[in-house]
Image: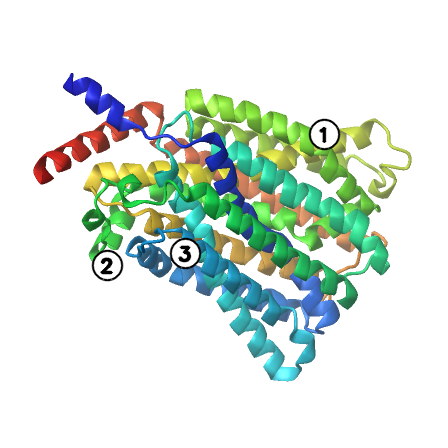
Amino acid sequence: MAKLVLEDAKYHRAKPWEIALFSMNNSASNLYLFAFGFLTYYATGVAGLTTLLVSSVLGMARLFDGIIDPTIGFIIDNFNTRWGKYRPIMLVSNIGLILSFLMIFNLHNLSGTAQTVMLFISLIFHKIVYSFQQTVTKAAQSALTNDPEQRPLFTLFDTVFSGIGVFSIGQYIVSNLLLPQYQNEYNGDFFTVFIPGICVVSLVLTILAMIGLSRKDQTRYFGLGHEEDQKLSLRDVWSIIKGNRPLQILAVCGGFVKFVAQLIGDQTFLVLLFGIILADMQLVGQVSLYLIIPQFIMIAIFTRIAGKKGLKFTYQTSIILALAAWILMTVLFASTTDTTQLFSPAGFLAYCFLGLWICARIFSVYPTSIVLTMSADITDYETSRTGKYAAGVIGTIFSLTDSIASSLSPIVLGLVFAGIGYVDGFPQPNEPLNPALMQGGYMLLGIIIAVFVVTAILIRFYPLDPETMEEVQAKIAAKKAQKANETA
């Protein structure tokens, strides 16, 4: 009988619609990440800043954000109100994101040193509030459900709302509906329409996510179910960083993959690949629509596999498939005499490129979504190890490595383009291809391949497989039962 009680207490589940709505919190913050891919064009083309200055300030702001991320996690883990632990943070941080964009996208009204200083201050503020909302996405999953077969559902819903809704459909709206209205240029009029739309949609998604989390945003679903066990000291934070091996490995892998995901989602990369190398900027929007069905099917398959074989297996598989796709794409370009004619008309090699791009995009981005769910496993591992509920700190350790790695993305892009002669601004869509731009493309593809090789090696050492997670949940259930007996 005692064994049955312990088994029943091991798992608490969420309703599928609750997971679906809560996944929109990641979409709400990803809308701002998507919009950030256009910031370099606003800063150089509208505000008048130089390429290297913008890339450097962006990199420094993200690096600063990474340094303060553990403090944000410490605050979240020691925060609780009668309205819940996470929902107040979600609302306040999203309002802060709106304010940050009002600051950033009004830089054209300033000049000189004031412009640069305001850019840096507004970016710092943006990164702080962004980290709060993004950390909740990682941290609250451990309270939403701890069933290993149900947790991968988050990735499926996140793919629909973020991967397809934000990045695929969003890219199509920009490239094929908005951009042609402004002569295919990211000018001031474009941003006057684009930025308010991002802010409004993100706020609506945040409110829906708060509704999805409302039932599970209670103390009894956190850690061992007692508020006194949730209080962390600074010594606890160091103990978590030092002693949690799964956290160390996955944080580094997650940072590398985030770097690639941000690099290939940046508009300067897409302009180079589609607008210049392939000479058809509208193609990126069309391909974004082509992504929808295969992306949904593939993630649905991976979600099913993850429920049976574990999250590590699907993460590792996705990295290997992404690596293969990027290598083959590089080979395809190298074996094509004139890439600008690849789709004039579309032939066998054009369809090969489409297949490779779809695979590269799906399998490069999938790990950035599933790592959010894997962080919940790591939170449970820490609770089983020490009895502490440290979802916020663990979430911001991921943000730390994300920020450090992704801070390199604008710097790398800036250095590559400056190195091939684009010092004062980035190339615009449909600019003629020349050997320097082709060289820049090969350099970026080489960097992506190298990052995935390193990640594929590191993830092999991640220890949280399905058998280990069964042991973790059994230990937590036993500690909860012991705690209940002590307080009875």
**CB under 8 Å between discs 3 and 2:** no
Q: Secondary structure at mark 2?
A: helix
Q: Residues within 10 Å of mark 3 (few under 14, many from 20)?
A: some
Mark 2 and mark 1: Cα distance apart in space: 49 Å
Mark 1 and mark 3: Cα distance apart in space: 43 Å
**Count of numbered labels shown in the rendering:** 3
Residue at 49% x, 53% y is 405
Tell me if residue 357 can be seen. yes
Asked whether 201 or 389 is in front, the reply is: 201
Disc 3 residue type (three-letter): Pro
Q: Earlier in the sequence, mark 2 or mark 1?
A: 2
Q: Is residue 118 above or below residue 440?
A: below
Asked whether 155 or 7 is in front, the reply is: 7
Name the image quarter holding residue 15.
top left
Quarter of the C terminus within the rendering: top left
Asked whether 410 or 439 is in front, the reply is: 410
Rendering coords of residue 49 (x, y %): 68, 73
Disc 2 residue type (three-letter): Leu
Residue at 54% x, 67% y is 123
**Location of mark 3 (residue):** 88
Q: Is residue 28 above or below residue 189?
A: above
Disc 2 vs disc 1: which is toward the camera?
2
**Location of mark 1 (residue):** 355
Q: Is residue 103 left or right of residue 125?
A: right
Residue at 61% x, 50% y is 263
Disc 1 residue type (three-letter): Gly
Q: Secondary structure at mark 3?
A: helix
